[in-house]
């Protein structure tokens, strides 16, 4: 083949710049268009036909480069992930053929904006299917260009919007709270410590304490913030940095807290499934349905009894006892066996944070809940909060917390205190459940140079 510099035919109408999402309209209008994007796939057919699947973030489009177009001096440099501008007109794909959206671009002029490497550095070589998970995480910045990873990121946006829409419809106010704090919320062992101009500070574990502080003037509030945990456990569902969706509500009861949680989960799924992203969701998880309400409520003590009855044993061969934490494995076993959402309720105070409200009938227990979902386990942790001054002081003392840094939190228990409660939902865990993914890391867009650990 003899290559030559392509020249745009000056007799053709000027091309209108569009995104792939507008391809159908452009086809109907019969307009000549130019689309900028990435060469997602490149396939030569014989010597005089080339198919390029173009990706521009708004969709995928099959583009056909005929004989003259294949002769371009740019052709040998047209590798996967090169950026290109493709000019032409849209037609429906011939009968019996299929392509995304049912149409293709017949290219009449094109150019390379930037050529991606070929040979050993070629995109396909770097991300070959045999590469193990560690390599794939090192190459996360490139993996994100793949179809599954980019669908996940788009659905992240769809679900986040559904959460915000839910809160907006229910008249919650969104708050943006500090990430650098002087206080702990979920125990010292998972705090990331840092130097704050010579004083100790931490990366936030939760926005809860700030949300509680806002309810007297704003009523129901929520936040979407990164939370940070120096996690000892490296599991499929633990991240050092995760997206935390939290809410706090004044004058609710424990039962109302559970009802609001059910409503939130069901409403968000319903919103997402009735959005234009429905098809993309069902492609990843064909089984996703709005769960049945009410969710099963199971007391912590009954969960321990259930595990004992099922003869589920710890690694050392012994059975679980009342007062012990229920870690990921038994939690998963239980929720996967029962196959439905479960509210675990009334955890013993001794194993929970300093702020949890005590059960009136049995003050060794708290008005707390974890929501477990099949396939993932805990996705939400919530509770009613101590609203009495003396009780919160006792809570600090029990956990060895210096009340000095919490004066503003304590003050809430002096100036018109009220019964209140709230929760935190791990967004990556929620997505792992809703989109049936194995690992919460798949829900993040971050990149992290290999170090044995990952964000
Ligand atoms: O149960 P947690 O620790 O509760 C709190 O932080 C409360 N202060 C929230 C509140 O009431 N406002 O965390 C809440 C949720 C968990 O159920 C889990 O989904 C998620 O946050 N989460 C994590 N997700 C990923 N990686 C981690 N290391 C996580 N730690 C907690």
Image (cartoon, grey):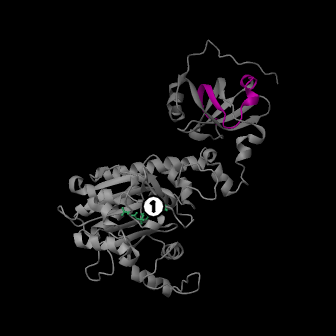
Quarter of image, res 234: bottom right
Q: In the current view of this chain or complex, which residue is farthest to the top?
A: 11
Start-end of magenta stretch: 68-94
Is residue 330 visible to the viewer in this orientation of the structure? yes
Residue 171 screen position, x and y as percent: 26, 52
Compared with 273, 90 (above or below) is above
Compared with 372, 277 (above or below) is above
**Residue 312 or residue 85, whichever sits in front:** 312
Question: Can residue 70 be found in the magenta stretch?
Answer: yes
Residue 70 screen position, x and y as percent: 74, 26
Cβ of mark 1 under 8 A from ligand 1: no
Count how many numbered circles sit on residues in the image.
Answer: 1
Quarter of image, res 360: bottom left
Identity of the residue drawn at 63% across and 44% down:
142
Q: Secondary structure at mark 1?
A: loop
Pick the quarter of the image with the C terminus.
bottom right
Compared with 153, 238 (above or below) is below
Which quadrant contains ligand 1? bottom left
Answer few, some or many: residues within 10 Å of disc 1's Cα (few below 14, many 20 plus, some between 14 and 19): few
Question: Can residue 335 be found in the magenta stretch?
Answer: no
The residue that label 1 is drawn on is: 289
């Amino acid at each position: 083949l003899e290559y030559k510099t392509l020249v745009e035919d000056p007799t053709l109408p000027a091309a209108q710049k569009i995104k792939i999402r507008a391809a159908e309209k452009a086809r109907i209008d019969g307009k000549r268009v130019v689309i900028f994007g990435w060469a997602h796939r490149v396939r030569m057919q014989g010597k005089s036909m080339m198919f390029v699947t173009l990706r521009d973030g708004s969709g995928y489009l099959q583009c056909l480069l005929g004989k003259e177009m294949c002769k371009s001096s740019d052709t040998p440099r047209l590798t996967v992930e090169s950026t290109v501008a493709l000019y032409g007109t849209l037609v429906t794909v011939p009968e019996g053929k299929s392509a995304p959206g049912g149409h293709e671009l017949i290219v009449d002029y094109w150019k390379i904006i930037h050529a991606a490497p070929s040979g050993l550095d070629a995109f396909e070589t770097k991300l070959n299917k045999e590469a193990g998970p560690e390599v794939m995480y090192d190459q996360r910045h490139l993996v994100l260009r793949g179809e599954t990873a980019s669908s996940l990121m788009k659905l992240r946006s769809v679900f986040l919007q559904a959460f915000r829409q839910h809160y907006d419809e229910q008249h919650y106010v969104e708050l943006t709270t500090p990430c650098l704090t002087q206080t702990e919320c979920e125990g010292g062992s998972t705090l990331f410590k840092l130097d704050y101009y010579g004083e100790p500070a931490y990366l936030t574990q939760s926005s809860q304490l700030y949300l509680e502080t806002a309810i007297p003037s704003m009523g129901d509030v929520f936040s979407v913030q990164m939370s940070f945990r120096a996690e000892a456990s490296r599991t499929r569902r633990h991240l050092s940095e995760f997206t935390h969706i939290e809410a706090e509500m004044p004058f609710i009861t424990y039962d109302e807290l559970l009802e609001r949680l059910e409503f939130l989960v069901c409403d968000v799924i319903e919103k997402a499934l009735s959005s234009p992203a429905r098809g993309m969701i069902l492609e990843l998880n064909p089984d996703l349905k709005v769960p049945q309400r009410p969710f099963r409520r199971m007391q912590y003590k009954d969960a321990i009894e259930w595990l004992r009855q099922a003869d589920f044993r710890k690694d050392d061969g012994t059975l679980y006892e009342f007062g012990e934490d229920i870690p990921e494995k038994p939690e998963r076993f239980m929720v996967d066996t029962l196959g439905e959402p479960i509210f675990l309720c009334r955890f013993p105070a001794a194993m929970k944070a300093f702020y949890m409200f005590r059960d009136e009938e049995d003050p060794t227990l708290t008005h707390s809940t974890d929501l477990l979902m099949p396939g993932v386990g805990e996705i939400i942790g919530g509770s009613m909060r101590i609203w009495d001054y003396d009780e919160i002081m006792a809570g600090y003392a029990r956990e060895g917390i210096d009340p000095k840094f919490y004066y503003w939190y304590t003050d809430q228990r002096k100036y018109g205190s009220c019964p209140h409660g709230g929760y935190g939902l791990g967004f990556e865990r929620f997505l792992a459940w809703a989109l049936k993914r194995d690992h919460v890391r798949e829900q993040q867009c971050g990149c992290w140079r290999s170090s044995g650990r990952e964000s």
